[in-house]
Image: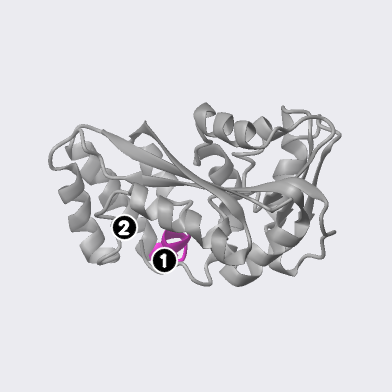
């Protein structure tokens, strides 16, 4: 995709669609997180960038308290409503790197498809400071890849992207090497016990559903509205010509790191 620098604001403009269409995360990922860091009602977790709450319920279901920091006003309101039955849930509006937080307070700090918006040096240092000694940081993200099951689908979409967003359609699948390098970043900031894991799944969309999904990506949202409408129509038409359904191949990476005792 195109450069996303400075586009973090875009997500909050489509908060309800984002909440509806962006995927959650697989059970196996949470199994790894909670095997690495046991969580129960005595524990506290901090979520960096809650978005539409896709990653929050499994953490709350451990019984721990969760406080989220989220810059988007609409996302904050949606998540307060979504998790209103959890008295141990709260959300603060603001950027993580600018929000004043208590040090050595949390057993787990986690961030799902959001930590890349935080400047690295500020983000890792702040996570380290917020964690209790022995506490864990879990960073994970979803990386969608082209439809590998329908010959010609990717090429058809590339033709449209070449017209409206040249050079932005991902051509490389997310690899274990990328996950390993991302995990090792934490070593530079004093973390230990580094782990990384990959998980895979597929998701099917109709042509109309897929263009709705594209409308939740920052670089697509930033396109001028009239041009975006033409772009999305051509994407939808291309998928319809290929049978009307597109399958996305997701790779989910998880990095785990611990603050020394």
Q: Position of residue 82 (x, y in %)?
A: 72, 35
Give the residue number, with chain letter if any, for mark 2. 231
Q: Along the line of sight, which residue is nearer the eye, 41 or 220? A: 41
Residue drawn 49% across the image and 54% down it: 183
Q: Is residue 258 left or right of residue 129?
A: left
Residue most toward the front?
261
First in sequence: mark 2 vs mark 1: 1
Q: Is residue 46 visible?
A: no
- For disc 1, the neighbor class at 10 Å (few under 14, some 14 to 19, many from 20) is some
Q: Which residues are magenta?
A: 218-226
Reading the image, the residue beneath label 1 is 223
Alpha carbons under labels 2 and 1: distance apart: 9 Å
Determine the main secondary structure of the stretch shown in magenta: helix
The residue under the point 40% across, 38% down is: 209
Residue shown at 73% from the left, 47% from the top: 134
In the image: residue 145, left or right of residue 190:
left
Q: Are marks 2 and 1 in contact (CB under 8 Å)?
A: yes
Residue at the left extreme of this rendering: 151
Residue 101 on image: x %, y % = 82, 60
Residue 152, position in %: x, y? 13, 42
Quadrant for residue 129, please give it: bottom right
Q: Residues within 10 Å of mark 2 (few under 14, many from 20)?
A: some
Query: Along the line of sight, which residue is nearer the eye, 202 or 37?
Result: 37
Q: Is residue 227 left or right of residue 10?
A: left
* Colour approach in the figure: one colour
Q: Where is residue 199 drawn, in percent x and y?
A: 42, 35
Q: The N terminus appears in which quarter of the rendering?
A: bottom left
Can the viewer see residue 251 in this picture? yes
Q: In terms of secondary structure, where does tag 2 sit? A: helix
- Verify whether residue 14 appears in magenta: no
Residue visible at 53% across and 27% down? 27
SS assignment at label 1 = loop
């Amino acid at each position: 995709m195109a450069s996303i620098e400075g586009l973090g604001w875009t997500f909050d403009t489509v908060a309800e669609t984002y909440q509806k269409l962006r995927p959650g995360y697989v059970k196996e990922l949470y199994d790894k997180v909670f095997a690495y860091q046991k969580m129960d009602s005595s524990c506290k977790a901090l979520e960096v960038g809650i978005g539409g709450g896709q990653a929050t319920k499994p953490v709350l279901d451990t019984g721990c308290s969760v406080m989220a920091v989220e810059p988007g006003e609409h996302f904050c309101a949606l998540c307060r409503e979504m998790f209103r039955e959890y008295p141990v849930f709260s959300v603060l509006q603001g950027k993580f790197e600018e929000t004043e937080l208590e040090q050595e307070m949390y057993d787990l700090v986690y961030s799902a498809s959001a930590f890349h918006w935080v400047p690295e040096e500020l983000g890792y240092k702040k996570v380290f400071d917020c964690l209790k000694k022995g506490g864990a940081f879990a960073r994970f993200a979803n990386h969608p890849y082209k439809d590998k099951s329908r010959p010609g689908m990717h090429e058809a979409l590339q033709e449209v992207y070449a017209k409206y967003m040249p050079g932005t359609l991902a051509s490389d699948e997310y690899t274990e090497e990328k996950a390993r390098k991302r995990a090792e970043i934490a070593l530079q900031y004093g973390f230990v016990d580094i782990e990384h894991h990959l998980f895979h799944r597929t998701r099917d969309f109709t042509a109309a559903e897929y263009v709705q999904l594209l409308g939740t990506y920052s670089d697509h949202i930033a396109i001028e509205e009239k041009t975006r409408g033409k772009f999305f129509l051509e994407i939808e038409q291309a998928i319809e010509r290929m049978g009307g359904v597109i399958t996305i191949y997701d790779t989910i990476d998880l990095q785990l790191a611990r603050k020394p005792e």
